[in-house]
Amino acid sequence: MSRRVTTRDDIAAVIALYKANHVLREISAQTGVALRVVQNLVKRFRDLGEDELPAPLPKSGRPKLLSPRTLKVISRQVRSNPSLTAHEVKERNTRLLSHVSLRCVQQALHDDLGFKSFRARRKPLLTKRQKENRVKFCKKYEVWDLETWRSVLWSDEA
């Protein structure tokens, strides 16, 4: 269940429609604010004396340990070097991340910034025969000029 934060603009719109004698269901439908939230806002508006708008309620829950600015720094580093691990990110930014655990950095990378963890696929090394074939190919066509290469119909162009 997602909880939508009610902004000052939402509150002002709800109260303006309430003052214009709209039904609460209509207010909810027009503003996109849940009916129960509209009811609570109108009740708080009446309790305050109908002179001022009710302030948005403070957020509940524990605040984030990493600021948006810190997340931006981490994101920039990981985008420039995608093979960085969370441990390496924490080591590179000791001043920024000294107060948080490695797990917190991992969760920030995964949940907040959207970097998924993965490992590069292992590619088999070239065998001796493949290396010889490559050298043979190069020697065979080393005398070709640019025009000859342009006349070749490559398999991905057909």
Image (cartoon, grey):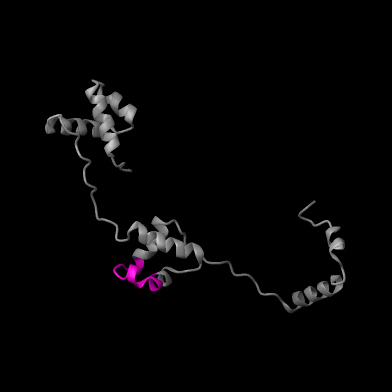
Is residue 58 in view from this perspective?
A: yes
Which region is colored magenta? Answer: 90-103
| Above or below for 67 versus 6 | below
Residue shown at 29%/42% (left/top)? Answer: 5
| Location of residue 148 by image quarter | bottom right
Task: Tell me if residue 30 is in the magenta stretch.
Answer: no
| Above or below for 107 versus 55 | below
* Residue 67 placement, left or right of 46: right
Task: Tell me if residue 91 is in the magenta stretch.
Answer: yes
- Quarter containing the N terminus: top left
* Residue 154 placement, left or right of 65: right
- Furthest-top residue in view? 21
Of residues 128 and 107, the one drawn nearer to the viewer in this rendering: 107
Magenta residues, dominant SS class = helix
- Furthest-front residue in view? 51
Residue shown at 63%/70% (left/top)? Answer: 123
| Location of residue 51 by image quarter | top left
| Above or below for 114 versus 136 | above
Image position, residue 126 (x, y; %)? 70, 75
Image position, residue 141 (x, y; %)? 85, 70
Is residue 82 in view from this perspective?
A: no
Image position, residue 82 (x, y; %)? 51, 65
* Residue 62 placement, left or right of 140: left
